[in-house]
Image (spheres, rainbow, N blue to C red):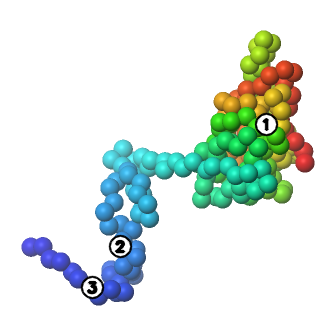
């Protein structure tokens, strides 16, 4: 036999020492395994996979830096302001990561990603010349003094089509990987201030 249990609003279901309120139950109501849904619990699908609910984080005017949060980890940050833009990473916590895509070259100021105070960038990024030189160069960040990637000229890789990822590997380091598009004599995009 089946039965329906109805509780007054504000009540809780208690089984053993576990109590679930109406709000807790609403997070479960209507979910489908493996399907993200706003304000609902995300559960693994039949293959034991949890899908990534990726979101796009738009930049803002150069004078208004975008401060990323841990909850935005996994998001795609898009540079699409010709006046340049700045993203500031949250404090590094191993596992956080952000993808950056250059949709529009900056014609003034720069595209910049900066670490929170005390965090540094480690790893390398490739810069590919799109002009007649056809050269590619790898630039390394040392993990102890490099705290920003500054795309302030064609030579440092501010051209549309570049992309890179920053992944926190500890409480103070972000690893970078990716590809930038540049022209002329390519130069390092990494900054120590």
User: Dot 1 surroundings within 10 Å: few (below 14), some, or many (20 or more)?
Assistant: some
Quadrant that contains the N terminus: bottom left
- On the question of residue 77 being in view, the answer is yes
Label 2 neighbour load within 10 Å: few <14, some 14-19, many 20+: some
Mark 3 surroundings within 10 Å by alpha-carbon count, few (fewer than 14), some (14 through 19), many (20 or more): few
Residue 124 quadrant: top right
Q: Mark 2 points at which residue?
A: 25
Kindly identify which numbered label has been placed on residue 27.
none
Give the camera-side residue of 180 and 122: 180
Q: Label 3: state its secondary structure.
A: loop
Q: Residue at x 84, y 56 (%)?
A: 118
The answer to whether residue 88 shows anywhere in this view is: no
Looking at marks 2 and 3 on the same chain, the residue that comes earlier in the sequence is marked by 3
Point out which mark residue 107 bears: 1
Q: Which of 68 and 91 is in front in this view?
A: 68
Residue drawn at (77%, 20%) of the image? 129
Disc number placed over residue 7 in the picture, else none: 3
Q: Where is residue 179 in the image (x, y as percent from the top left)?
A: 70, 29
- Going from N to C along the chain, the mark reached first, 1 or 3, is 3
Label 2 SS: helix
Asked if disc 1 and disc 3 are in contact, CB closer than 8 Å, the reply is no
- Pick whichever, 16 or 58, lies toward us: 58
Residues at marks 2 and 3, CA–CA distance in whole angstroms: 12 Å
Locate residue 39, reporting x and y percent: 44, 64
Of all residues, the one furthest to the top in this rendering is 132
Residue at 60 percent of width and 59 percent of height? 71
């Amino acid at each position: 036999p089946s039965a329906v249990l109805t509780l007054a609003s504000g009540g809780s279901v208690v089984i053993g020492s576990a109590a679930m309120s109406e709000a807790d139950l609403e997070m479960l109501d209507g979910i489908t395994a493996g399907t993200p849904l706003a304000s609902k619990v995300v559960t693994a699908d039949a293959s034991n996979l949890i899908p990534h609910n990726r979101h796009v984080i738009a930049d803002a005017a150069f004078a208004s830096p975008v401060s990323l949060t841990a909850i935005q980890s996994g998001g795609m940050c898009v540079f699409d302001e010709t006046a340049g833009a700045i993203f500031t990473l949250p404090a590094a916590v191993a596992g956080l990561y952000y993808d950056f895509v250059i949709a529009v070259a900056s014609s003034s100021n720069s595209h910049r990603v900066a670490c929170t105070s005390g965090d540094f960038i480690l790893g390398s990024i490739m810069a590919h010349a799109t002009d007649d030189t056809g050269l590619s160069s790898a630039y390394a960040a040392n993990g102890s003094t490099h705290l920003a990637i500054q795309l302030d000229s064609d030579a440092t890789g501010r051209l549309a089509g570049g992309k890179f990822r920053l992944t926190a590997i500890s409480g103070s380091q972000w690893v970078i990987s990716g590809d930038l598009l540049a022209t002329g004599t390519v130069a390092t995009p990494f900054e120590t201030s």
